[in-house]
Image (cartoon, rainbow, N blue to C red):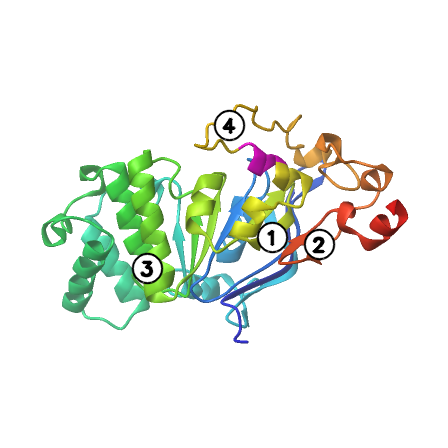
Amino acid sequence: MSEPVLSVRNLEVEFANRHRTLRAVDGVSLDIEKGEVLGVVGESGAGKSVTGLAVIGLIDPPGRISGGEIRLAGLRIDDLPPEEIRKVRGKRIGMIFQDPLTSLNPLYRIGDQLVETMRTHLNLSEGAARKRAIALLAEVGIPAPDKRIDGYPHQFSGGMRQRVVIALAICAEPELIIADEPTTALDVSVQAQIIALIKRLGRDHGTAVMLVTHDMGVIAETCDRVAVMYSGRIAEIGPVQDVVRNPLHPYAKGLMGAIPTLAGDTHRLVQIPGAMPRLSAIPPGCAFNPRCGFVFDRCRVERPEPKPQGSQIVACHLYDSSVRNSAA
């Protein structure tokens, strides 16, 4: 098999304050292949966005990558000096943020921002870069791109600004795109258009996409595989249809059971009791154990390691063969 576009192994990210060091990402491992969309889902505070920021090298002090490694097409990038990671960011890895206004400079025309980015990373003349910028705006669905290219960000709607940000993310032909909640600030009809656009990136350009979101509907519609995160760890990872239809981890079962359907079922949606623990109060053993309906003694003292279970990988003691044998 070919090298995955992104390979993360045992990633740890810590934030230090005056009193203690808090671990926001704790031993995350995942791969994304060429043209694949991997969804990363979980509640607020699960570590989804921090994982994405670590991949692109945007963890600001007092945060730091304290363990593990990140490889982009075989090249280790987590230990690169700042000037080297800047060359990778934008050229080989693109970023789509939740709020497009944070990605666009309000003082510059969008065409100038696209042209500057392309000329920084690609060997293009200004005329060629502008021509490519117009083609990219057309590709992401901006009407009359030859006229809108000279507009300022405030002259675009939220959905159109997000399309511009996607054009900015793909303009240097990156191998990987990190999309952090790219549809949250948009209305439902625009969400569907942005989802279709992200899916097309993988199909038409072969771009690998890491899609960070808390919206399982977006995951089910967009992704090839999904990683369910809880308290800085991956609870379950597998093909999206398998995880949605047959979740294994009790937390994943709760997430999927909380999704309303159009079937007209009269039963109540699943409710997960409690809340995600604070980083300063993560319980020993399995972090989900205080909220789990299947908890037993081992869960409170021993942290489960990810284990293959069919097409999925799940970090739960319920799927340990020794537990099953003793239960039998």
The residue sitting at 21% across, 37% down in the picture is 154
Cα–Cα gap, marks 1 and 3: 27 Å
Q: Sequence order check: which comes first, mark 4 or mark 2?
A: 4
Sequence-earlier tag: 3 or 4: 3
Whole-number angstrom distance, CA of label 1 to CA of label 4: 28 Å
Residue tagged 2: 306
Q: Name the mark nearer the viewer: 1 or 4.
A: 4
SS class of the residue under badge 2?
Answer: loop
Mark found first going from the N terminus, 2 or 1:
1
- In the displayed orientation, state which residue is furthest to the right: 326
Q: Which residue is mark 4?
A: 265
Find residue 51 and report its horizontal and vertical position in percent.
55, 50
Q: What is the distance, in whole Å, between disc 2 and disc 3 at their CAs?
A: 33 Å
Q: Nearer the viewer, residue 168 or 315?
A: 315
What secondary structure is found at the residue carrying circle 4?
loop
Name the amino acid type tagged 3.
Ile
